[in-house]
Image (cartoon, coloured by chain):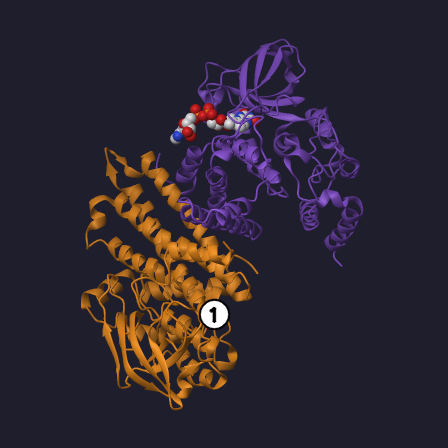
Amino acid sequence: MSLLLSDEQVQLREAAHDFLGERSPVARQRALRDGGDALGFDPVLWRDAADMGWTAAVFPEAVGGLDFGWQGLSAVFEECGRTLAALPLLSNVALAGGAVLALGNAEQQQRWLPSIIAGEPRFATAFEEGARHAPTRVRTQARRAGAGWVLDGEKTFVIDGVGADQYLVLARSAGADDEPDGLSLFCVPADGPGVVATGVRMVDARNTANLALHEVHVDADALLGTAGKAWPAFDQVLDRARACLAAEALGLVREVFARTIDYLGQRVQFDVPIGSFQALQHRAARLYVEIELLESAVRGAFEAIDAGSAEIGPLVSLAKARASDLCATVPNEAVQMHGGIGVTDEFDLGLFVKRARVLRQQLGDGAFHRERYARLRGF
Amino acid sequence: MSELDQFRTQTRAWLDANCPPAMREPITADDMVWGGSQLAFKNDDQRAWFEAMRERGWFAPGWPREYGGGGLDRRQAQVLDEEMRRLHCRQPQYNLGIWMLAPVLLKHGTHAQKLEHLVPMAQGRVRWCQGFSEPNAGSDLASLRTRAEPDGEDFIVNGSKIWTSYGNFADWMYALVRTDPAAKKQAGISFVLIDMQSPGVTVKPIELISGKSSFCEVFFDNVRVPRRQLVGALNDGWTLGKELLQHERAAMSKFAEGAAPSLDPLASVRAWLAENPGDALAPELRTRLAKLLMDAQAFALTHRRVTEQALARHDVKGPAAIMKLVQTEQEVAKYELLADALGQRALVWEDAPSTGLEHEVDRGWLLSKTYTIAGGSSEVQLNIIAKRVLGLPT
Ligand SMILES: Cc1cc2nc3c(=O)[nH]c(=O)nc-3n(C[C@H](O)[C@H](O)[C@H](O)COP(=O)(O)OP(=O)(O)OC[C@H]3O[C@@H](n4cnc5c(N)ncnc54)[C@H](O)[C@@H]3O)c2cc1C
């Protein structure tokens, strides 16, 4: 095991770098935003990303995957962070694919994983019900009805929830609000009666929806895993997705930082480059230190994931807490050091600021993950 | 089996046979054996381990045998290092001469200087201190003023050094002195070796806010230093001094590795949290403790990543430049947390009753203030990152 990318992983990153640099530069994200399309990504780019093998990387060969490991996928997420490429990779691969792999039986895996790997039909996973990440705060009810189930409730901020074909819905079949026990995961077709997804326009212009479930009937085989026992396996699915977001954040803040260092060397005031002012040098150096520590934390989290270690929980919380913190610090400092141009819409920095803020909130901010780390460490 | 593998097998067997089990336990500052004329052992295990390693020349495994070293090549020395880590062997002695001065002497010293100084170092007979800083030359080291004037076969040295760590135990000092007052700051400095027993040398330990210390003031009053103790060319000392400081980080890591965690903040702060759940400080302290442990883990991962990068021959200039800054600031944060958790208990002084923890915390807390100043202050570290790593303009 290593904290460095292997040669193959470096190749994957370079391929992602070239592909995204050409097909999805930052200008493309701006165009998507200006177009106002609720889908928030380009379906052709998504199909081509699947052809690149990105959707297959983490799945076992038995279901058509490449068994390449999560560290490799993290390199793709990093590159997405650098160019702000919008792809439903987290929603389909890390969340839905991860959930089917962790909770689904052999028949369900054969039914869904090949299509997840093919990039079609599309999946979205609906677990949040509030404004902040709180995955066990589930009030959506699942009642038995004959051989099947009936679902009722409201889900919020479903990632890539607009235009999805299937929803994996976390619902409560027993227990009280906020109890990990009693949670169940169901696969719900989007076109079923009582299923209504409403797009929510977000600051980063990505695909997000609220999902209403009203008396939705599903068959017994829509249930993944044992009723009431989705946790803690679902938490482990979330951990992989959290780590992926931390990797995207790492790429994003590295890009923002590189652009800022560039600017410090170019912008002249008082007849000297502003980068010669020690007040700014020290702030830039502090950011560099924090980003290096983040990279170590991200690599450490994926190393644990690929090793199936018992330390996945704390290491992922370490990485996501740092990533979430830096998703505020780095863009905020970058804007300040750019001066007025940094707050204009025409300048790309704002697009990074907005995406970073979403990454900070999704799947737990620094406070959530410090609290979780403390709990996992037993205090 | 390759020759190197064979060497590894033999080395492992030899270490296993010669390193007493007690010498494989984590080490505390009190248990460190320092080579030098005041060499002392607390027990037979320390002595046996010291002597066994000395006989092999393994205090300085990579030096040539003629200078008292072990004569190992680079890869063998690396294997020895790895095997010592594997068995958790303590450093048989701590010696700034070997770790900091010797690389410079090996490169720039004359054959006679190497024979005179390296051999006793390799036998653990001489202890060295570093005489760089002066009252008026701290971060701006090049403004040092201690003068060395030629007089026949000698230099006559006048002036003073400050912050000389363990100056009160040292036999010799490597020092930067001014040999050309007319030249530009950096250009008039020379690198000399000074016998601390020379007439005119006075050493005075400094009392710190944490109490007695071994950081000293050293005064030179017409001290005669033979010209043969000049290392490198006259007035070329700045280059040598800068080179030497590059070894400081590696030397400091010898102190860190194998060190017993002097205080487990988790234990005492956790205990406090368990006993005082309703205290107004509890929620904040819990968050700070989590943050501290997470930062420490991120640092440990970075340490590992830099080591792996170095082995893979990547450029580690960037991440390596952050280590001193991060580690010392984390230590400071740890003691701030401990002091807060103990409340006024952490503030009892001198002979007030203590379970041991209280005194350790208040001394440790005050001493931790030196970490972000000594060895290049945090601000200087940030300057280095900004200029040498990020390439920001001057
Ligand atoms: C415990 C201890 C042990 C030591 N051991 C040794 C030893 O064995 N041998 C030896 O030679 N020296 C030793 N030193 C000295 C040490 O290297 C100096 O203390 C250090 O370089 C700082 O110098 P100074 O204390 O004079 O502070 P100053 O240089 O006067 O600094 C004062 C403040 O100004 C800031 N500052 C200075 N320059 C800049 C700049 N360019 N940009 C921004 N901020 C700046 C500093 O960061 C600091 O905050 C030791 C020091 C201590 C405290």
Q: Is residue A117 above or below residue B231?
A: below
Task: Where is residue A28? Give x, y as percent.
Answer: 26, 65
Which residue is denoted by mark 1 in the rendering?
A232
Task: Where is residue A45? Give x, y as percent.
Answer: 32, 72
Locate the N terminus of chain B by quadrant.
bottom right
> Label 1 is placed on what type of residue?
Pro
Give the image quarter of residue A222: bottom left
Colour of chain B, in one word, is: purple
Locate the C terminus of chain B by quadrant.
top left
Q: Nearer the viewer, residue A133 or A182?
A: A182
Task: Where is residue A272? Give x, y as percent.
Answer: 27, 34
Asked if ligand 1 lies within 8 A of label 1, the reply is no
The subunit carrying tag 1 is A
For the point 79% across and 36% down, which residue is it? Answer: B44
Q: Is residue A289 above or below residue B132?
A: below
Q: Is residue A120 above or below residue A91?
A: below
Residue B82 seen in the current view: yes
For the point 41% across and 47% down, which residue is it? Answer: A290
Q: Nearer the viewer, residue A104 or B312?
A: A104
Q: Is residue A42 above or below residue B1?
A: below
Task: Where is residue A65? Give x, y as percent.
Answer: 48, 77
Instruction: Report helix, strand or loop for mark 1.
Output: loop
Which residue extends farthest bottom? A146
For the point 21% across and 71% down, which residue is it? Answer: A37
Left/right of residue A146 with respect to residue B15 in the rendered view: left
Residue B140 seen in the current view: no
Q: Nearer the viewer, residue A36 or A315?
A: A315
| Chain painted in orange in the figure | A
Badge 1 density bin: few <14, some 14–19, many ≥20, Cα 10 Å:
few
How many labels sit on residues? 1
For the point 39% across and 44% down, which residue is it? Answer: B280
